[in-house]
Image (cartoon, helix red, strand yellow):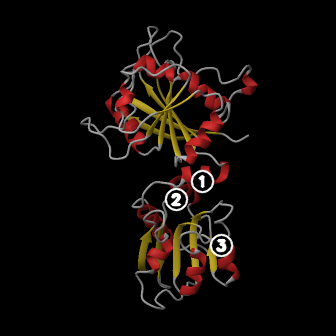
Amino acid sequence: MSVTDAERSALRHAFALATNGPRGLNPQVGAVILSPEGAVLAEGWHHGAGTPHAEIDALSKLGPDAARGATAVVTLEPCNHTGRTGPCAVALIEAGVARVVYSAEDPGAVSSGGAERLHAAGVDVEGGVLREEGEDLISSWLTVQRLGRPHVTVKWAQSLDGRAAASDGTSQWITGPDARADVHRRRSRADAIVVGTGTVLADDPELTARTADGSLYEDQPRPVVVGIRAVPQEAALRRHPRPFMQDEGEDLRDLLDRLRELGAHRVFLEGGPTLAASFLRQGLVDELLVYVAPTLIGGDRVAVGDIGVTTIAEQRRLEIVGLDRLGDDILVTLTPKEG
């Protein structure tokens, strides 16, 4: 059976519903229950760890047997395990749902298998619908499930000729206010913000997420400094609302593992060029945000350092997944190409 227009519309609405849920250790998920005729019967989303999942939230708004013969449209494959809540696949079966349409597949070693359980119970299942949008919604959670580490975004700002600073080391500001505001919005959605000691000593960053008027966003990333040099007592990041963490940087994968243990699923790497190169060289980057300003600086202060490429055959190919105009600047969003 093909996916209907009503189901696609419901799935897009479920994406929007999912964003009502908190970002955290669990994925944001939305659900819509449709009648056999395609009318919306109920909707819901996951409100946070320990609360009913999106499907259960939606079903709870219906009376007994009201979901019998209905279609459940969900942004993520219904789970198949018992944690602090029961399996959503079982709840849908018991509610009498006749069809389930979902977007992203659940890669979890424990939670996956919901589609198979539904199918075995006679429920019609259609998965992978609007997959790209569904995976984008929970990209950091998927990285943790697939790779066992936080999702890493590397950000840098550069001139058109690829420089991150002038010859004397000054770098504020290459990009304009619109680009900087975008960076702060993204910081507010990260669990940790990572910089090298060189950036701390050269720029004395606050590493906070601030609104246009200078006030702090409610959610602030954990500041992390990588390097052996001491952070000065008067450094601005010592006034950060969250205490900073310092790591010598000998094992970046170990650092990511420890950040995951602390609850970090989204790591935002801001600098400098040596640290960014280290993460890229070790294959620990999932997304790149490159803010390009229409200016020329010259000199040797490149935006990213040695990533281990010695010949053109070794170049690291990237896929452009977004191009955005931010005032006078351009934001290029990229992901590493597999293989």
Distance (Cα) linking label 2 and label 1: 8 Å
Label 3 – label 2 distance at C-alpha: 18 Å
In the rendering, at what x and y percent does residue 227 appear?
Answer: 55, 24
Cβ atoms under marks 2 and 1 closer than 8 Å: yes
Quadrant of res 61: bottom left
Q: Nearer the viewer, residue 296 or 272?
A: 272
Crowd band around label 3 with a 10 angstrom C-alpha radius: few (<14), some (14–19), many (20+): many
Q: Is residue 97 above or below residue 13?
A: below
First in sequence, mark 3 or 1: give its number: 3
Amino acid type of the residue that numbered disc 3 sits on in the rendered structure: Ala
Name the residue at 50% across, 19% down. Answer: 198
According to the picture, the residue beneath numbered tag 3 turns out to be 115
For the image, the number of numbered tags is 3
Q: Which residue is mark 2?
A: 27
N-terminal label among 2 and 1: 2
Three-letter amino acid code at the position of disc 1: Leu
SS assignment at label 2: loop
Q: Secondary structure at mark 3?
A: helix
- Residue 334 or residue 190, whichever sits in front: 190
Residue at 40 percent across and 32 percent down: it is: 207
Image quarter in which the C terminus is found: top right
Marks 3/1: CA–CA distance: 17 Å
Residue receiving disc 1: 142
